[in-house]
Structures are given as C-alpha cells and as structure tokens.
Amino acid sequence: MQSCEISSESTDDPLSSGLRTHRQPRIVVIGAGLAGLAATKVLLKNGFTDVTVLEASDHIGGRVLSVQQGKATLELGATWIHGAIGNPVYHLAEDNGLLEDTTDEERSVGRISLYTKNGVSHYQTNVGKRIPKDLVEEFSDLYNEVYELTQEFFQNGKPVCAESQNSVGIFTRDVVRKRITVDPDDSESTKKLKLSMLQQYLKVESCESSSPSMDEVSLSEFGEWTEIPGAHHVIPEGFMKIVELLARDIPSSTVCLSKPIRCIHWNFSAQRQEVIDKSDDTIRDNNHNENNHSCRPHQDPVKLRSPIFLECEDEEWIMADHVIVTASLGVLKQNHEAMFSPSLPEDKVLAIEKLGISTTDKIFLEFEEPFWSPECNSIQFVWEDEAQLEQPVYPEDLWYKKICSFDVLYPPERYGHMLSGWICGQEALYMERCDDETVAETCTELLRRFTGNPDIPKPCRVLRSSWGSNPYIQGSYSFTRVGSSGEDCERLAMPLPYANSTKAPPLQVLFAGEATHRKYYSTTHGALLSGQREATRLVEMYQDLHRVQHTKPNM
C-alpha cells in the first residue's frame, strides 16, 4: 500500500523543506474544468507531487462540453476563443494546430459573436415579415453608439445618473428610445419596428452577458470587462481539445471523477477533535486508492496536523494542506453555507451574493435540408408587440419568447444544415424542464411564424444544453450585477485565512474560476489564468520559505 509519507530521499527538496516535514504539501484541487486543470498543471510542473483533483461529475472539462453529432462537433458550453493577442487559450490552440482547419467563416470580428461573419442576418417579425436590411443597419449603428456610451462610465470615470439606476438595460433603453422618438425622418411604423428591435438586441446582449436581463447588469462596472484584441475563433475539432491539452501531462491517477465534496473543514484545530473521533473509522477504512488511483490513503490527522479536511459526499474524509476551489459562482451561491466550516468571512459571502450568474443555453436543430436562403447567417426574432415593454419577463408556458435568434452554423460541409438557438435567464430553466419533443415542436412553430413559411419541417435532431439545472454548475458564467464591482471578483479570489490571521497556516483555501478574474470574468481564458494564478501563489510561497530557511544564520 502506498504510504502518505514521501520517502527520505526527497526530504531535501524545496517543497518538503519549506513545510519542515518529511513530506510534500498535500494539495487538493476541487474541479477539473479549465481553472482546475490549469492550476494542477502549474503545480506538477513546479515539483509538487502530492496533488489530487476531485471532480464532482463523471468527466473533466467543467463548462466545456463538446458533443460529436454526425460529422459535426457541437459545443454545448464554451464555443469561442475570444481574442488572440496574449490570449493563453488562443496560443495553446494555435501552437497545437487546432486552428488549422478553422475557416474564414469561423473567425468573427464582431462584438456579438456569431458562427460566421459572412452573409446577412435576417431580422424577422412575429407576423412573418423581414425587416429591410437598410433599416436594420440604421438601427444597429444607433445601438452600437449607445453601447459605446455604456463603456465610458467605467473607462472614463463618468458619473452614473440616478435615472439609469446604474443599470445597462435601463440606460440603453432610455437613450435609444429617446433618439428614436425624436427622429423626424422616421414614420411611426418605422419607429415601432426600431423599438421592437431594441428589445431583441437586449435579449442578445443578455445571452452574451449570461444575465436574466440587461437591467441587472451594472452600468458603472460594464466597461471593466476587457476584450483581448483579435478575432473570435471556433475550434473545428471541439473546445474539449483545449481541455485534453491541459490534462495531457496530468497523470490519470491524479484525477478522481464522480467525487463531489460535501464540506471543506478548514483551519482545523483541536476544538474539532470530536469530528476527528467521529470520522476515525472512515478515515482508516475508507481508502478508495485501490479502486480509484487518484486518491491516497489516510493516517492519523492529529499526527499529520493537516489544517484542512475535505468531507466527500461518499463519506470519505481527505486531508490537505491546501485546497484550490474552482466551483462555479452558481455552486458557491447555492452551497457556500454548507460547503465551508467554519463559514466564509462575511465580506466574501457578500461578494458571492452581489456578483451575478445566470443561465445561457443553446438549442441545436438539425434539418435534412436548409429552409433558409444561402446568404442567411442567422434568423433574429423581433416581437412587434414588445416595442413598449420595459423588461420582458415571461411565464413558463411562454418561455420560447426569450429565444433571441437562431444562428446558421458554417461551413455546411462540417455542420450539415444546423441552427443554433440562444435563450437565457429563467426562461432557459423553463426550457430545460421540457422534453426534446416539446422543444422541437415549439422551435419549429416559432421558425414558421417568424419566417412566414408554414412548410418548415420539424428538425431531424435536437441537442441542447442544461447548465442551469446541472447541480455541479448551476449557471453558465458570471456578470457584474447592479450593486457589485470588480472588487467583488478580487474579494472572491482572496485566499483564506486572510493575511492578518498570522497564527493560522497560510493559503489554506484558494479560489479560482472565471468569476474570480476581475477583467476576464465569463471567459475561458479568465478561468485558465485564474487557475494559474492560484497555483503560482503556492509555488511562490514555498520558494520563499525555502529561501528563508537556507539564509538563516547558523546559531
């Protein structure tokens, strides 16, 4: 049986010396998404050998989920590499030849990313009419002008007026409506169409932000999210290839799948002796190393003086010196009270509560033949009866009204005749409760209604995501909600115990994941960089300890 102790031959390495023990520090990474895998890779590369990854689901990747459907690879999760220059995900893909087959159509330079930059978006109304292209372009220019204004509040320190309630949605609706209303060149019918298009654009923006509504997105903080220069790229073989590259040098024995955590007992002390007593038998007897090589046997916790105990859902207890938590913001919102003992500090809880996360889902529809014209790159749904609505909220039976569009996947040689629909917020959760047949019928009726073509057949295949109801994800990605700021991202990322707790072992609980990155939240590169950041904290701490010990004067 493998021993918990490192052999005596390794007692002189910097990591063991830094801990002043005859073993390396035990590090547990919770979550095998991009953040968790990136952290693990940095740790292993820097000589840490006692590293274990605990993943609650039965697969690695987190919010990256590529599914093979025929010849096509469909992305239920992360789809685009957002930007190129300095983007670690882009460079990882480029250096490993993952973008060699990416076509020009799969490189988007638009702010709102579609699957193709070629062709024309068809804006269709609920009475089956297409809005003229010149009118669409005219409105788009207006909307983009106002979008740029939303960026100025953070970037230029511009004060937010009280009327906007610090909301991107309220501000945008108010400014755009005023400009449309006072335009002397537009007829009343044209103004109504533009006002209806405004609602559709805000739905698209909500899907991009993964917010229930742009009314919930903070105006004063909206401009802090930083866009990396360069195009958005699709990986033809699937975004999971990035996950596989990160996992390539991580031994399979390091990763435990289907291993959800019940509670992280940190700052473990003698006062918790009763917990140790209660779990002694489980710790000694429940060694699953023989069944799953990713976890190690346990010894007496008092002798090892580990500051952290991880209580797993399967009743196993795992000791650690450090744990890197990469759980999504959705999971932290739902479970933080039960997940940490002692409880998280009040300011960290407040950051979790203030930051926003919602669900953005995709609905893929495959057809035998295209019913759309060759130049059509998307079908955008504009409800004319929503022109004067403030914040569209729909009951469960009208969930489909939150679908903002269906994009055409290009090239057809790779994807066949495939559409990808977008829906977000509570309505996405309603969609997740429906069966495939209901979703197929509902979307078909929607397409028939807006295109004015009653002969559109039902899709031959349906595939959709369900990030909101996934118990180990509970949302798609984070946003800065009204009342929150980038400081909350940094507060969420701050390791425990805080630096002023000088008597406690440092860096016990570290936090990574896209929601902890102040400038790149909601992105795959933000997640990857956050994992590297937390692993680097540990690397630097042990290097510093090693230097201190080797520079002490002999007494």
Image (cartoon, rainbow, N blue to C red):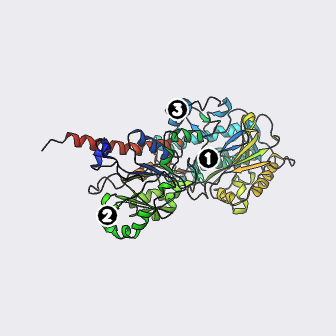
Check disc 1 and report the residue beneath it: 65
Q: Is residue 86 above or below residue 396?
A: above
Q: Which mark identifies residue 91? A: 3
Pointer 2 residue: 269
Question: Given the current orientation, which residue lies at the most extreme front position?
Answer: 1
Q: Nearer the viewer, mark 2 or mark 1?
A: 2
- The residue nearer to you, when weighing 82 against 215, is 82
Using the image, tell me which numbered label, if any, was put on residue 191: none
Image quadrant containing the C terminus = top left
Q: Mark 3 or mark 1: which comes first in sequence?
A: 1
Left or right: 448 in relation to 337: right
Left/right placement of residue 133 relative to residue 497 reads: right
3D distance between C-alphas at marks 2 and 1:
40 Å
Mark 3 closeness class: few <14, some 14–19, many ≥20 residues within 10 Å: some
Q: Which amino acid, mark 2?
A: Ser
Residue 333 in percent (x, y) is at 50, 60
The three-letter amino acid code for the residue at tag 1 is Leu
Q: Is residue 90 above or below residue 441?
A: above
- The amino acid pointed to by label 3 is His
Query: Residue at position x 69%, y 36% from top?
Result: 137
